[in-house]
Image: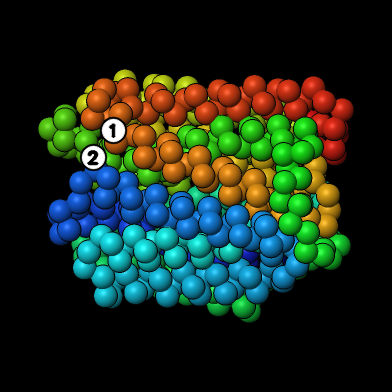
Amino acid sequence: MAGRWRALAALSLAELFALSLWFSASAVLPALSREWSLGASGRAGLTIAVQLGFIVGTLASALGNLPDVWSPRLLMLGSIVAGVVANTTLALTVDGLGPALTLRFVTGLAMAGAYPPAMKIIATWFRERRGLAIGVLIGALTVGSAIPHFIRGVTDLPWRQTLLAASGLATIAALIVWLGVSEGPYRFPPARFDVRMAATVFRERPLRLACFGYFGHMWELYAMWAWLGVFFAESLATRGGAGYAGLNASLATFVAMAAGAAGCYAGGIVSDRWGRTTLTMAAMALSGLCALLIGLTFGGPPWLTLLVGVVWGVTVIADSAQFSTAVTELSPPAYVGTALTTQTSVGFALTMVSIWLIPPLADLVGWRWAFAALAAGPFLGVVAMARLRALPDALKLASGRR
């Protein structure tokens, strides 16, 4: 069915551009720190505010069954427009941390309606190869999250113009959703409002274990994305300058994060062919190892730091789509959107803790050891997915491939 690949391309492009809003402020933190005299808590707050908005948005969406009761396309479209308005307002009018935190919170709320509904839409186009399809979608999200670092790395734009560039890309995303996105032939049955369905992911053991694996993954992912650029910059400064194979710290960060798109694609293929638990356990084991090792390269040869960063960027996201795919395969069909949104909400709540944790750890033990704390998440996630693999319900995954 050729239409499903066109749908995947349109939806992936929309996600790529829309998610440029997520780390737009994080990419310009050095400039904001100088202009607003931000300390460590202020810098962390600008990223955590987005996470908090996303959590509140996904929680409200899950409790209200919004992705299942409303049109996911219209929910996605309205949310992207709201994100553009919030980010543009920050770029044009804000001169201090307080209003910026509020608008970053609103941006997070908007992303709650732009991300989980997209996964449900793409699931309506794919039964077979669903893992690959959602993997491509998450790969687009990964590149989109890295785009502000790319803009910062290849231009001399002031921070306000960098934010406006992200808003422009998200506006294109809204147009793509409006004109080129629709639900596919495998639509899930309509749902009635039922607040109890948000707790389904914790009542059923297979779903609970899939979510626990996801939570371990999320403990690591966004803290890595949030602070890798700072790590790269500090490592270069400690060494006394130079660059990462000709790249400045911002471009090196973009390369490491964007490399995750290849991991998402490969993860989708491996997961569909050899099983969801097989892929997720392997990816988490490798990414956890990178979290332990990258600090040992701090201040060392830049090529080695970048190499470990790229491997980490690939493996830290390679499994993300497969946790979501597993939820679509294990949850009640009428409430797939609610289950996805609940899983996502709790996972992002954990990211607030790990994002906040890294700066004080860096002050306490140095960047050489700060990222090692992230390894606990994926290693515990491996345990959860191994237990899921042993259950009979695991045969529902990837057409019986566990």
Q: In the rendering, at what x and y percent does residue 159 appear?
A: 24, 63
At horizontal 61% and vertical 37% (from top left) the residue drawn is 214
Point 50% across, 40% down: residue: 350
| Image location of residue 311, percent across then percent down | 46, 32
Quadrant location, the N terminus: bottom right
Circle nearer the viewer, 1 or 2: 1
Q: Residue at x 64, y 22 (%)?
A: 383
Mark 1 lies on a secondary structure that is: helix
Residues packed near mark 1 inside 10 Å, few (<14), some (14 to 19) or many (20 plus):
few
Quarter of the image containing the C terminus? top right
Which corner quadrant of the image does residue 263 belong to?
A: top right
Q: Which residue is mark 2?
A: 233
- In this view, the residue in front, 230 or 350, is 350
From the viewer's perspective, is 310 left or right of 303? right
- The scheme the figure's colours follow is rainbow
For image coordinates 43% across by 56% down, the residue present is 50
Percent from the top left, x then y, of residue 9? Answer: 63, 62
Q: Which residue position is annotated with label 1?
A: 360
Disc 2 crowd rating (10 Å Cα; few below 14, some 14-19, many 20+) is some
| Residue 91 visible to the viewer | yes
x, y percent for residue 144: 47, 57
Amino acid at pointer 1: Pro
Q: Please count the marks in the image.
A: 2
Residue 24: name its quadrant.
Answer: bottom left
Query: What's the distance in space between the residues labelled 1 and 2, CA to CA?
Result: 17 Å
